[in-house]
Amino acid sequence: MTMRAARLYGKEDLRVEEMPVPEPGVGEVLLRVKAAAVCGTDIRMYRNGARGATPGNPLVLGHEVSGIVESAGPDVHGYSAGMPIAVAPNMGCGVCDQCVSGNTQMCATFRAFGINIPGGFAPFMLIPREAVSQGNLAPIPEGADFVSAALVEPLACVYNAFQRIAIVPGDTVLVIGAGPIGLMHAKVALMAGAAKVFMNDLSAERLSLCRKVEPAIIALESAGLKERLSELTAGNGVTVCITAAPSAEAQVLALEVVGLNGRVMFFGGLPDGKSKVSLDTNLVHYKQITITGTSRQSLIQYRQTLALVASGRLVVKDLVTMKTPLDEIRASFEQVMQGKGLKNIIEFA
Ligand SMILES: [Zn+2]
Ligand SMILES: [Zn+2]
């Protein structure tokens, strides 16, 4: 049996082509993909090429995936054909300290679907034995559809940041970067009871798109931003600032706009070679600022996020601005590269 899959051969070389449908071996599961979301990481891999994708060994992209168990190989426990599943993408060696502490995503030899093993921009995806036994397959509870379940992956990255920065009711939060990830941060902060959630972006168009999805956010353009924030927080500054943009300026700004005892989350990474930033460390000192960062998510954070989405308390489906079949994946990538819309979904029958 063959299937059509989107494979990256190298820089700007993505081909939708026939390849064999994988067969699940001992301990493995074959997933029938229902929805896979397009991520900024996919676009970066497409634009720049990726270590795991070469002409000799092209890689099926797609790491934000949901589907149904098609079949399970011998010696698989807990999963059977027909189960709806959301897939946490990162798996570890299972034996290092990070893995043992539940942080398989921080394993030195971590592997991830669509990053260095075949992902979900294909009608079928093979789940290796360690992913099955580590618990990367999360059964989708009643209340979550496949599109929402595919969006759990980026949302769980945001949830990781949310837990680390410990947003509590009454916080005033500024999110810099009005892309889909920034909007997810804003949604989680609102859910947690933040008194005010501000968003800022260089693009007024993206800001207004976010406000259309989430009218409770306060969109602030960059001109006069510091003064407006000061007015809107009675001169105190925000209690939390999250940078959700690959921007050094955003990191510099974050230290300026948080108040005394403020917390700063460097969520968005900076481009390679541009991550050494000059920061005013006296602001950290005199304002007692806590700076932290996060990357990816643990398996339990993934499952907690899925449960929140299924509960209906955290809605992310409204971020979807484009749905296409796999054969139109390049058009979908094109939209993202032009900065149009928020989240794009590749849908399967
Ligand atoms: Zn992603
Ligand atoms: Zn490990």
Image (cartoon, rainbow, N blue to C red):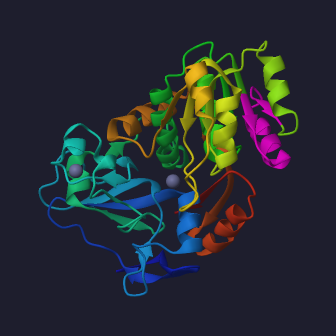
Q: Is residue 204 magenta?
A: yes
How many labels, in total?
A: 0
Res 190 quadrant in image: top right
Query: Percent x, y for residue 108?
Result: 28, 55
Query: Percent x, y for residue 47?
Result: 59, 72
Q: Nearer the viewer, residue 119 or 194?
A: 194
Q: Is residue 50 magenta?
A: no
Q: Residue at x 57, y 47 (%)?
A: 268
Q: Nearer the viewer, residue 30 or 207?
A: 207
Image position of 248 (left or right of 5): right
Query: Percent x, y for residue 321?
Result: 70, 52
Q: Residue at x 74, y 38 (%)?
A: 213
Span colored in magenta: 198-220
Q: Residue at x 26, y 38 (%)?
A: 102
Instruction: Relative to 189, say whether 151 is above or below.
Output: below
Q: Residue at x 71, y 43 (%)?
A: 178
Q: Can residue 179 be seen from the camera position used here?
A: no
Instruction: Relative to 330, say whether 270 is above or below.
Output: above
Q: Can residue 322 be seen from the camera position used here?
A: yes
Res 266 quadrant in image: top right
Q: Residue furthest right?
A: 223
Image position of 174 (left or right of 71): right
Query: Percent x, y for residue 83?
Result: 34, 48
Image position of 314 (left or right of 303): right
